[in-house]
Image (cartoon, rainbow, N blue to C red):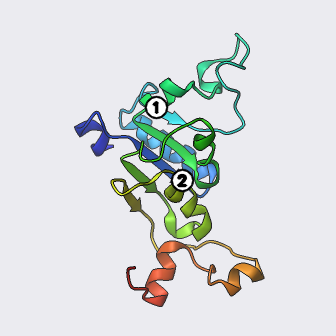
Amino acid sequence: MQLVQRDESVRVLACTPSDAATHLFAERLAAAGLDSARLYLLDASLPYEEDASDDAGAISQIPGHERLLGFSVVLSICSKAATLQNLDVPVGHFSHIVIDEAAQAEEPLVMIPIMTFSNAYTNIILAGDPNQLGPVIESPTAASFFLLYGPCTYRTKHRISAL
């Protein structure tokens, strides 16, 4: 919130591992003063503005390309963030990518928004408490590739050095 208030040019893609966390994040940002002209909650099941019926409200539509690029903050769950690529949001458009509740997310899900929209100038922020409940990984294939932990937990348990 402080980033957006200080600099009008800041564009934030904020992602969480679940719909519930995303909606809570949106409520908190709205309560802090971020209005619907600057905050967009992406729901991939919504119709595009061009395809929506006349009686559908603005909140129930995916905005057109130019309007989408004008939002200061776009919120999404990690897995739906790739929808923005289909809407022609360019790599590097977001100055910041924030993954909230990162300790609860599976590592491949966290990588969707990061690998899809970041460039050398994008600030990436992983926020989460590694001592909270971590992700539930049930796949033996994922286990064989060390994807048992979320991005925050894995680093604290296995001391990975930076590349």
For this orientation, the residue located farthest to the top is 54
Relative to 70, say whether 125 is above or below.
below
Q: Which mark is residue 101?
A: none
Sequence order check, earlier mark of 2 and 1 = 1
Q: Is residue 143 left or right of residue 104?
A: right
Between residue 85 and residue 55, name the one nearer to us. 85
Q: Nearer the viewer, residue 32 or 80?
A: 80
SS at mark 1? helix
Q: Quadrant of the N terminus?
A: top left
- The structure residue drawn at horizontal position 38% and vertical position 50%, both measured from the top left corner, is 96
Number of marks drawn:
2
- Tag 1: amino acid: Leu
Provide residue 141's location: percent of width, then percent of height. Answer: 75, 81
Residue 94 pos. (x, y %): 41, 45
Pointer 2: residues within 10 angstroms few (<14), some, or many (20+)?
A: some
Mark 2, residue position: 116
State the residue at coordinates (70%, 10%): 54
Q: Nearer the viewer, residue 73 or 119?
A: 119
SS category of the residue bearing label 2 = helix
Q: In the drawing, does residue 132 fall left or right of residue 126?
A: right
Task: Indicate the amino acid at tag 2.
Answer: Thr
Q: Quadrant of the C terminus?
A: bottom left
Residue at x 63% of width, y 80% of height: 148
Q: Which residue is mark 1?
A: 69
Image: 5 above or below 112: above
- Give the x, y percent position of residue 5: 27, 37
